[in-house]
Image (cartoon, grey):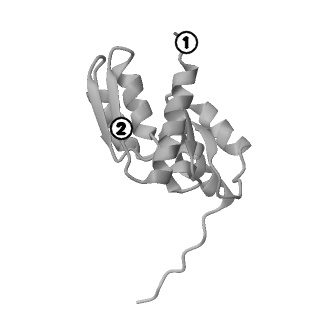
Amino acid sequence: MSEIAQRPPSAIQRAYRFVNRPYYWYRPSQLAQRLRTPEQPGDGLRLVRTAWGAQLYCWPDPLGKAVARTGVYDLTVAETLARLTDPGETAIDAGANVGLMSSLLARAVGPGGRVISFEPHPLIFETLVRNVALWLSLIHI
């Protein structure tokens, strides 16, 4: 048996793989943002925008990079939460991290609902509190 040498993908194949994703097809503005926003060095917080329009401070970890790139992290969980949460409900986000899913839940439950978020890590909790303060400042009452 001989081994077949695999060629690396061509530039056209790489470009196709890059853009052929549902979050780009349904939200072309996210693709434009990804192309416009270069990878930033550093360890500080960055303000990113989620697929549902919320702003969020994130660290440059896998979660933060994914949200900056695509507007979402763990698409399956986000889609499930959005579909199963009804307006006016109370939702709990245990292990909320910086609040990505909390912001999605808050959008789903609406002004008549409530989201309770819990994050045990002190540094991440500070970021969660900062994000909640940001969201509250953007609400026009």
Name above or below for residue 72 compared with residue 59.
above
Which residue does the image show at 67% across and 38% down from the upper left? 33
How far across and down, in percent of the image, does residue 73 sit?
45, 45
Splitting the image into 4 quarters, where does residue 67 fall? top right
Name above or below for residue 31 compared with residue 14.
above
Splitting the image into 4 quarters, where does residue 10 fall? bottom right
Viewer-proximal residue among 38 and 54 = 54
Q: Is residue 39 left or right of residue 139?
A: right
Amino acid of disc 2: Ser
Viewer-proximal residue among 2 and 24 = 24
Mark 1 surroundings: few (<14), some (14-19) or many (≥20) residues within 10 A: few
Mark 2 surroundings: few (<14), some (14-19) or many (≥20) residues within 10 A: many
Name above or below for residue 9 compared with residue 32.
below
The answer to whether any part of residue 50 appears in the image is: no
Cα separation, mark 2 vs mark 1, equals 22 Å
Q: From this viewpoint, which residue is outermost toward the top? A: 141
Q: Is residue 41 left or right of residue 123?
A: right
What kind of element bears circle 2?
strand
Quarter containing the N terminus: bottom left
Which residue does the image show at 52% across and 44% down from the upper left? 127
The label number, if any, that marks residue 117 in the structure image: 2
Which residue does the image show at 69% across and 53% down from the upper left? 39
Splitting the image into 4 quarters, where does residue 116 fall? top left
The answer to whether any part of residue 19 appears in the image is: yes
How far across and down, in percent of the image, does residue 62 sit?
51, 56
Mark 2 vs 1: CB contact within 8 A: no
Amino acid of disc 1: His
Which residue does the image show at 52% across and 9% down from the upper left? 141
What kind of element bears circle 1?
loop
How far across and down, in percent of the image, does residue 122 sit?
45, 52
The label number, if any, that marks residue 140 in the structure image: 1
